[in-house]
Image (spheres, grey):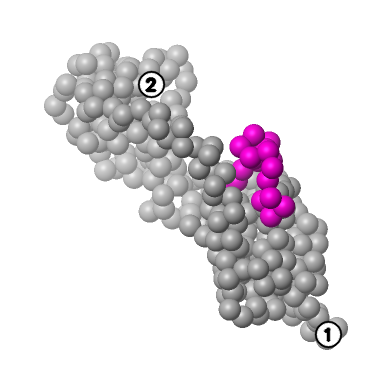
Amino acid sequence: MENQQAVITAAEASKLHPALTLTQQSLVEAQKGPKVNQATTSQFSTLWNRVAALLGIKVAPENRNEFENEILEFTAYVCEEYPDLYLNEIYKAYRLAVKRELDIETLIPVLAPTYFGVVWKAYTTYRDSHLRPLYKKQYFLEEAREKPAPTPEEQEKMLRDLFAKALEMSKSGQNYYDAGNLLFNWLLEKDLIFFSQERIDGFFARASQELQAEAKRAKQSTTILGEVVKYNKMLEDARNQDSAPVIIRAKHISFNVLLKEVIELEIGVDDYLNSNF
């Protein structure tokens, strides 16, 4: 993916290769500071002013308002599509582009979504070509020691044990966080989810309401532009009951309801998992 970060810290780099090249050092240093999803409006303003200066972009006074609106739209695009980028790396990318060190046929001096991807793709290709040898030195031993995948029998035992743990947590009054809806989906494959359609609809409605309330509260508590864009997207997703966040939350809600009902029926783990409903 173009916007995926391949981060290696300076400390890790020095252990792997005490004599980093100047290029490697500068690429590692660029992976510091605020990320897009953490940056304030002031930090974005500083970044785009520096990049505009690099590109030689000059705006006539009568066009200033239009230009600022375009920059706001551009910033919103970067926040949504590239939330994990470091601001320093964005500047580094444009600086290398201006120096003609990136594989870009023609450098167009604009700040716009249509061209940002071109610059970033060229930068990541350049960056990874210089830092990939460090990743290989760091990870090849770990990869060689990877454990074999569990057998189906081992997976089944693990899931049964997790289900027993989830029941114990529910008995103590706690909600169980079913990461990735792992247990819910496992029970679903076994035809052990027995809710009526009416109750399922209720779980989805509750999930949508909860997520909307959370997104609204989060949006009200921040002034960081990247986070505002993120929470707007979360709110949009929360209103759509077919969206992944709502489906995941609805499964989480229904799974914890199921745990409580299994406990109320006083059914043991093995008896429940071996039942036919």
Q: Nearer the viewer, residue 23 or 98?
A: 23
In 3D space, how far apart are the residues under numbered discs 1 and 2 (Cα atoms)?
64 Å
Residue that appears at 69% across and 42% down: 19
Q: How many marks?
A: 2
Q: Residues within 10 Å of mark 2 (few under 14, many from 20)?
A: many
Task: Decide whether residue 73 is among the magenta residues.
Answer: no
Which circle marks residue 114 in the picture?
none
Task: Decide whether residue 17 is among the magenta residues.
Answer: yes
Decide: is 82 above or below 109. Answer: above
Q: Quick check: 13 left or right of 235?
A: right
Q: Earlier in the sequence, mark 1 or mark 2?
A: 1
Q: Quick check: 136 left or right of 101?
A: left
Name the quarter where the C terminus is drawn: top left
Quarter residue 60 falls in: bottom right
Q: Position of residue 33 (x, y in %)?
A: 73, 47
Q: Position of residue 171 (x, y in %)?
A: 40, 15
Q: Position of residue 249 (x, y in %)?
A: 43, 40
Q: Quick check: 215 left or right of 67?
A: left
Is residue 71 at least partly visible in the picture?
Answer: no
Whether residues under marks 1 and 2 lie with C-beta atoms below 8 angstroms apart, the answer is no
Quarter residue 267 falls in: top left
For the record, the magenta segment spans: 6-24
Is residue 139 at least partly visible in the picture?
Answer: yes
Q: Which residue is mark 1?
A: 60
Q: Which residue is mark 2?
A: 166
Q: Position of residue 34 (x, y in %)?
A: 72, 49
Residue positioned most to the left: 276
Quarter residue 67 falls in: bottom right
Q: Nearer the viewer, residue 5 or 97?
A: 97
Residue type (three-letter) at the residue carrying disc 1: Ala
SS type, badge 2: helix
